[in-house]
Image: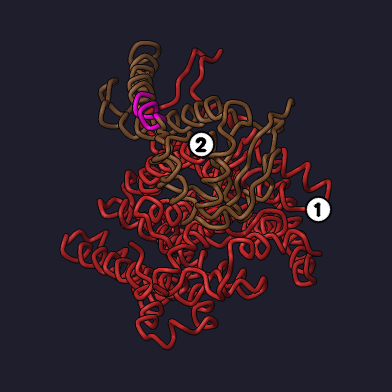
């Protein structure tokens, strides 16, 4: 049974079931606020720069990027891993807590899943563009073709990546949509606008909320949740094998799969925190996303940050303990000291040290501090991927091959563009989709009463 | 869509609804359907409804897993064997990840299809909404007017705390 004494109330402010529907529907029924329009404008400009950069990349080729023969993976792969990491935690959050039957997920899971779907779409853009000839993209799909038939290499992590990301996107999107069906029905039955009634009615798929519908709905949610939980772990492990099967110093390690999975959960939870603070602040959802919700995420962040710190130190220890001079060079003379010192310490301080501030209860209860720390973690996680991709590639076994790397404006543009796409996606989500799963919030309301008895 | 005639009993909260469902069962009155804003597990048990979707998903998992293994065997070993760095053509261990991910994908697609088929849920379906407040904050029992002992049902509804009883 849920213990309100431990976690605090799930929904504060003495809300009734009807209040839940009204409150969560309000942003859909009212005119969008001014800040929404301003941010939408900015995000559109960012997206236009991104689209222009993508156009240049496709028409002129990868030569417009800063990558060279030595550093063949630049910002594109950094951003790919960064976005997919963020995209990871949304579903991880929602699904792990569903499988573990944690009631406090209900106000947060919808936004986390929305974030996942948009972030994974941004992520998928990068490897596609990195292929160079994006119009031959379909070659990676194994289907009986006229080229032999020539099949794909089933032993290649790059193919695993393609399969994992497509599967992840499809499953996350289905899971997200499934959860929205009852809420769309609520909007259909409650709204006074004829257009909304028709549109949400169409997407509610004829949902009525009968016993049989609910039992099948729950069964399906648990099936999708249960198997997607496996996928959450496997997708980022697969992304890590892209690196771990390479013989570059600093890549060829067995720690990579768990290290990547934890990193993904870390950055994703930080992004969930950022988003929830924005939602809570700008849409006045303090009663639904309570201090105890944010506190719970903060506590998870502290814990995961400890794992991250351990992973960083393990890597460094193993490099030293192995006695391998290339590993020692990479970690001690190319990361901790040397050309990439700022990037290494930016990663270490923002991921392993700064989140430790959240041990202090006073800071954990301060929304501004939480917001700043969540942003710092996201920046730190970007630097982690920079360290992995660029430092190892730039100085490998032969000094004659050494080269450094600077991104071109086109690469920067694509990254800024994806930030724009992401913001646009999230803003549209705020405007047109109920930000919290109404039916699920209503389902946990009864646990509020336990305390009163 | 032709509308059926129903007796509708409305409750304001989950607790009286569950108690009422128990009472109806004791009295041997069958409730045609229950509409609620969120899933209530006690009602599932009282109404004795079960879903076999997880059994179906388990079977799909076997089909998907064995299917993709067979396909990779065909593609990489029989149809076009290629030498990748001297690895054996049938490199079973490195087929495992593809097997795992594809199985999950297959189970998802098939379970969704089964759900749509069984629950008859699809975009743009025409429906007969009994009481629009059931997706908001009301809990509703529904009895068909034909073949129901109206007096007994209304009495039971009243005694179990239904806030409204009406014909539709």
Magenta segment main secondary structure: helix
Q: Residue at the location (69% across, 33% down)?
A: B127
Which corner quadrant of the image does residue A338 belong to?
bottom left
Residue depicted at x 79% and y 66% = A37
Residue A412 seen from this side: no
Q: Position of residue A276 (x, y in %)?
A: 56, 68
Assess whether residue A324 is covered by the magenta stretch. no
Examine the rendered structure and indicate whether residue A387 appears above or below residue A186: below
- Give the structural element (helix, strand or loop) at label 2: loop
Residue A202's x, y, as percent? 72, 38
Q: Are marks 1 and 2 in contact (CB under 8 Å)?
A: no
**Residue denoted by label 1:** A192
Chain of the residue on which disc 1 is drawn? A
Chain identifier, colour red: A
Of the pair A192 and A396, the residue shown nearer to us: A192
Residue drawn at 47 percent across, 27 percent down: B110
Assess disc 2: are there few (<14), some (14-19) or many (≥20) residues with their C-alpha within 10 Å of its C-alpha: some
Give the quarter of the image for residue A201: top right
Camera-nearest residue between A2 and A339:
A2
Question: Which chain is indicated by disc 2?
Answer: B
Neighbor class of circle 1 (other Cα within 10 Å; few <14, some 14-19, many 20+) is few
Residue A386 vs residue A309, the one in the foreground = A309
Q: Which mark is residue B31?
A: 2
Residue B109 screen position, x and y as percent: 49, 30
Q: x, y (%) of residue A159?
A: 44, 34
Q: Nearer the viewer, residue B31 or A99?
A: B31
Quadrant where the N terminus of chain B lies? top right
Q: Which chain is brown?
A: B
Q: Is mark 1 on a helix, strand or loop?
A: loop
- Residue range corresponding to the magenta coloring: B52-59
In the rendered view, would you say A194 is above or below A26?
Answer: above
């Amino acid at each position: 049974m849920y213990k309100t004494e431990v976690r605090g109330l799930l929904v504060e402010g003495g809300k009734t079931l009807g209040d839940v529907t009204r409150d969560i529907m309000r942003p859909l029924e009212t005119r969008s606020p001014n800040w929404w329009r301003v941010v939408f404008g900015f995000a559109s400009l960012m997206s236009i720069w991104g689209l222009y950069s993508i156009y240049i990349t496709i028409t002129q080729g990868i030569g417009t990027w800063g990558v060279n023969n030595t550093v063949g993976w630049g910002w594109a792969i950094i951003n790919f891993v960064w976005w997919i990491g963020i995209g990871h935690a949304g579903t991880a959050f929602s699904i792990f807590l569903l499988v573990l039957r944690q009631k406090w997920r209900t106000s947060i899971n919808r936004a986390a899943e929305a974030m996942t779907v948009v972030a994974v779409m941004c992520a998928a853009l990068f490897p596609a563009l990195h292929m160079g000839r994006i119009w031959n993209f379909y070659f990676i799909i194994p289907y009986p073709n006229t080229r032999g038939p020539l099949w794909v290499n089933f032993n290649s992590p790059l193919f695993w990546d393609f399969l994992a990301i497509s599967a992840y996107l499809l499953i996350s999107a289905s899971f997200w949509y499934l959860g929205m069906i009852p809420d769309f029905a609520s909007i259909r039955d409650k709204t006074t606008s004829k257009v909304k009634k028709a549109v949400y009615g169409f997407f509610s798929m004829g949902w009525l909320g009968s016993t049989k519908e609910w039992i099948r709905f729950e069964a399906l949610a648990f099936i999708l949740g249960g198997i997607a939980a496996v996928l959450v772990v496997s997708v980022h492990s697969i992304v890590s094998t892209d690196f771990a099967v390479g013989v570059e110093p600093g890549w060829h390690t067995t720690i990579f799969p768990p290290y990547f999975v934890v990193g993904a959960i870390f950055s994703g939870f930080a992004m969930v925190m950022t988003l929830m603070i924005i939602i809570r602040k700008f849409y006045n959802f303090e009663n639904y996303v309570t201090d105890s919700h944010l506190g719970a995420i903060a506590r998870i962040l502290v814990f995961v940050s400890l794992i991250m710190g351990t992973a960083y130190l393990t890597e460094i220890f193993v490099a030293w303990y192995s006695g391998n001079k290339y590993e020692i060079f990479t970690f001690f003379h190319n990361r901790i000291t040397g050309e990439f010192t700022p990037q290494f310490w930016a990663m270490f301080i923002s991921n392993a040290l700064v989140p430790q501030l959240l041990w202090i209860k006073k800071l954990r209860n301060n929304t501004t501090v939480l917001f700043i720390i969540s942003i710092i973690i996201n920046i730190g996680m970007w630097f982690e991927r920079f360290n992995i991709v660029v430092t190892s590639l730039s100085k490998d076994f032969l000094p004659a091959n050494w080269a450094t790397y600077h991104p071109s404006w086109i690469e920067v543009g694509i990254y800024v563009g994806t930030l724009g796409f992401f913001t646009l996606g999230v803003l549209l989500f705020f405007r047109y989709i109920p930000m919290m799963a109404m039916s699920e919030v209503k389902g946990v309301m009864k646990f509020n009463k336990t305390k009163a008895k | 869509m032709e509308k059926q005639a129903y007796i509708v009993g409305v409750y304001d909260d989950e607790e009286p609804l569950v108690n009422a469902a128990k009472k109806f069962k004791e009295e041997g009155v069958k409730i045609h359907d229950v509409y609620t804003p969120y899933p209530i597990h006690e009602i599932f048990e009282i109404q004795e409804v079960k879903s076999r979707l997880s059994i179906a998903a388990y079977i799909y998992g076997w089909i998907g897993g064995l299917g993709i293994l067979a396909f990779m065997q065909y593609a990489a070993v029989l149809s076009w064997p290629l030498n990748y760095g001297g690895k054996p053509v049938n490199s079973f261990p490195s087929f495992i990840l593809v097997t795992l991910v594809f199985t999950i994908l297959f189970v998802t697609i098939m379970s969704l299809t089964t759900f749509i088929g069984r629950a008859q849920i699809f975009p743009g379906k025409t429906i007969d909404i009994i009481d629009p407040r059931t997706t908001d904050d009301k809990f509703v029992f529904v009895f068909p007017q034909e073949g129901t002992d109206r007096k007994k049902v209304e009495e039971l509804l009243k005694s179990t705390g239904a806030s409204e009883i009406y014909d539709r």
